[in-house]
Image (cartoon, rainbow, N blue to C red):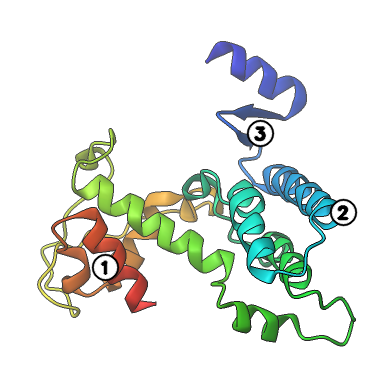
Amino acid sequence: YQLHSQSLNRTNATKYLGVTISADLKWNTHVSNITAKANRTLGLLRRNLQVGDNKTKERAYISLVRPQVEYASTVWDPYTSAQKSQVEMVQRRAARYVTRRYHNTSSVTSMLETLQWDSLERRREQARLIMFYKVVNNMVALPQQDFLTTSNRPSRHGSHITFLHIPTRADYFRYSFFPRTVPEWNQLNSSITSAETLTQFKTSLFKSY
């Protein structure tokens, strides 16, 4: 810990388990790092995987590029419009690559609809809810009693366990995992949150989006 603190003070940012943490607790540096890396990988694919089969290129993007902008996203999920747009641009470039439509008048939105790709923002929200399910059901080493307080108020979305909102002041805490995900969890229907297995939860969650 002391070593990481010294590194953080010296450079204003340090990488820990693949996530770049800045001294101001903002994600600008991390987002810039991962999008630059993903764009380089996408450029490599464009130069070396010049095939006519869209499915092959789609699998390459999903396997090699998208994981780079989703790794540990429950930790750093950005909340500013600029950062969210910066991440989405990776997928928008990938859509042009897969569909081979590079003209500036081509609609990337229609490409994404044709490919049936969810936005990366939506996928990050789903990832946070899946992690929250794991926490609530003691599937990860995060004791929920240290972070969450059960609400006694009945839910408007069925009889499922809800949690009190976590009071915050600074944005870096307000948009961190627990304060951000609690309201989203509380909005889910009880048929989703009461799933007996993680697989059932994922299936129900994806169907609801």
Quarter of the image for the C terminus: give it. Answer: bottom left
The amino acid type, in three-letter code, at marker 2 is Arg
Q: Residue 156's image quarter? A: bottom left
Where's residue 208, x and y in %? 33, 77
The amino acid type, in three-letter code, at marker 3 is Ala
Q: Which residue is mark 2?
A: 47
Where's residue 37, x and y in %? 75, 44
Alpha carbon of mark 2 to alpha carbon of mark 3: how far?
A: 37 Å
State if disc 1 and disc 2 touch (CB < 8 Å).
no
The answer to whether residue 175 is left or right of residue 107 is left
Where's residue 23, x and y in %? 66, 33
Alpha carbon of mark 1 to alpha carbon of mark 3: how far?
A: 32 Å
Q: Residue at x 83, y 51 (%)?
A: 48
Element assignment for label 2: helix
Residue 180 in sight here: no
Alpha carbon of mark 2 to alpha carbon of mark 1: how far?
A: 46 Å
Above or below for 77 versus 19 = below
Q: In the drawing, what numbered circle is on residue 6? A: none
